Image: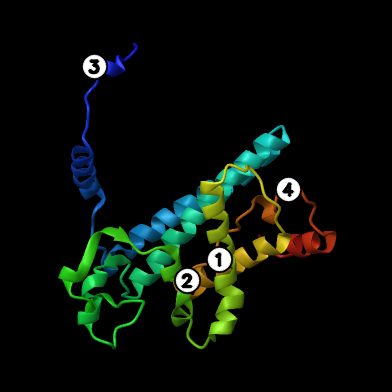
Amino acid sequence: MMVNITKSIRLTDEDLANFLKKYKDNFSKIYKEKHWSLFKENADKFFDFFREIYTNLPNIRGMNKACQEELKARIFLGIGCELLLKAVYLKNGYLINLIDKGKLKKLGKNIDKPYKISKVPFEYINKDGTEGLRYYLDKLEIFFDGMSREKCNAYVKKGLEIVKLWRNKEAHIGRGYHSEDITNWIDIRSSLTEIYKVVFGEKLKPLFPNNKKMMFSPQPFPQDLVALFKNNKG
């Protein structure tokens, strides 16, 4: 049935703003330490969505379709990583909600990012939003006892920075493909392996079926790196 636009309801800017404010309340929440498992479970689900795409890639005909599926997989991977980092912070008692920056100075000079939940007055916490990925990446080394910032950059942060870049570009640019290097995947696997092992005491499930990366890329990978990846469990 066709809708007659000329007779449809009109909304003023103010009406629209009020509607959005009310609607956003459905998603507004101040997250506490006990909520970490919710974020971890959802992260695991998105990583499973990622694995499912790569499991099915051999059955897809056509480079364009395969590239589209890889694009979707990288976005799922990015969502999973952000949820996982939020679980890391909550599990260790750190705030993931935004705080009122206008009142930030009142908290005292000794409170720096990331913010401990126990040190931030409830009324300063913004229930309508959470911090962006940069907040979670900047101080990641604090969760890895004995690991220097430089070592954390190499073994944990680098892979997550790659995922962050992929997710942002794939979500905002309709390119459909990009060149990648097999070492990107090695860095990503290293990041997730360390987080699962150190923070959650778990072993990361292989990211790819049969421990291999299905390589649909406009640029071929160097064969020595392909062999290196295949010989290390996915």
Q: Is residue 120 left or right of residue 149?
A: left
Q: Nearer the viewer, residue 55 or 188?
A: 188
Between the residue at mark 3 and the residue at mark 2, the CA separation in whole angstroms equals 50 Å
Q: Position of residue 29 (x, y in %)?
A: 23, 57
Front position among marks 3 and 2? 3
N-term mark: 2 or 1: 2
Q: Position of residue 23 (x, y in %)?
A: 22, 43
Q: What residue is pinned by disc 1?
A: 161
Q: Is residue 116 left or right of residue 185?
A: left
Contact flag, marks 3 and 2 (Cβ < 8 Å): no
Residue 97 quadrant: bottom left
Residue 44, compared with residue 16, is above or below; it is: below
N-term mark: 1 or 4: 1
Between the residue at mark 3 and the residue at mark 1, the CA separation in whole angstroms equals 49 Å
Contact flag, marks 2 and 1 (Cβ < 8 Å): yes
Q: What residue is pinned by disc 4?
A: 217
Residue 39, compared with residue 76, is above or below; it is: below
Image point (72%, 33%), residue name = 62
Image point (70%, 53%), residue name = 213
Q: What residue is pinned by disc 3?
A: 7
N-term mark: 2 or 4: 2
Contact flag, marks 2 and 4 (Cβ < 8 Å): no
Instruction: Estimate how packed mark 2 is, as few (under 14), some (14 to 19) or many (20 or more) residues with alpha carbons within 10 Å.
Output: some
Indicate the amino acid at tag 4.
Answer: Ser
Indicate the amino acid at tag 3.
Answer: Lys
Q: Please give the count of numbered marks on the rendered protein.
A: 4
Between the residue at mark 2 and the residue at mark 4, the CA separation in whole angstroms equals 28 Å
Q: Secondary structure at mark 2?
A: helix
Position of the N terminus, as image quadrant, is top left
